[in-house]
Image (cartoon, rainbow, N blue to C red):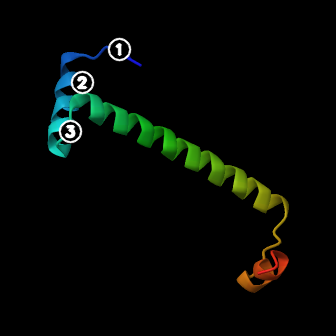
Amino acid sequence: MVISIRMTEEEKELANAYAKLNGVSLSEAIKRAYFEKIEDEYDIALADAALRDYEKDHKTYSHEEIKKMLGL
């Protein structure tokens, strides 16, 4: 898949500097940054959901209790 991105000259210079700093092509640098951002936001959403669940029910389990529940 090919994706086109419009950048100002300043943005292009920054992106090229970032790519050079990391020793990768501009395309690879943008791809990495894009997916790191997605992963970060996904992790935050999961953590927020877990916190909301915990706030509904403060019950926690020890490692031993979990192992017993899982039959380990």
Q: Earlier in the sequence, mark 3 or mark 2?
A: 2
**Residue 34 location in percent, x, y?**
40, 34
- Measuring from the top left, give residue 64's x and y in whole percent: 75, 86
Q: Amino acid at mark 2?
A: Glu
Q: Is residue 13 above or below residue 55?
A: above
Question: In terms of image quadrants, where is residue 53?
Answer: bottom right
Q: Residue sitting at 57 percent across and 43 percent down?
A: 42
Q: Quadrant of the N terminus?
A: top left
Q: Earlier in the sequence, mark 1 or mark 3?
A: 1
Dot in front, 3 or 2: 3
Q: Which residue is mark 2?
A: 11
Q: Nearer the viewer, residue 10 or 24?
A: 24
Label 2 vs label 1, nearer the camera:
1
Q: As drawn, is 21 to the left or to the right of 33?
A: left
Q: Which residue lies under the disc numbered 3? A: 24
Report the number of numbered marks. Answer: 3
Give the number of the disc on residue 4.
1
Q: Amino acid at mark 1?
A: Ser
Q: CA distance from mark 3 to mark 2?
A: 17 Å
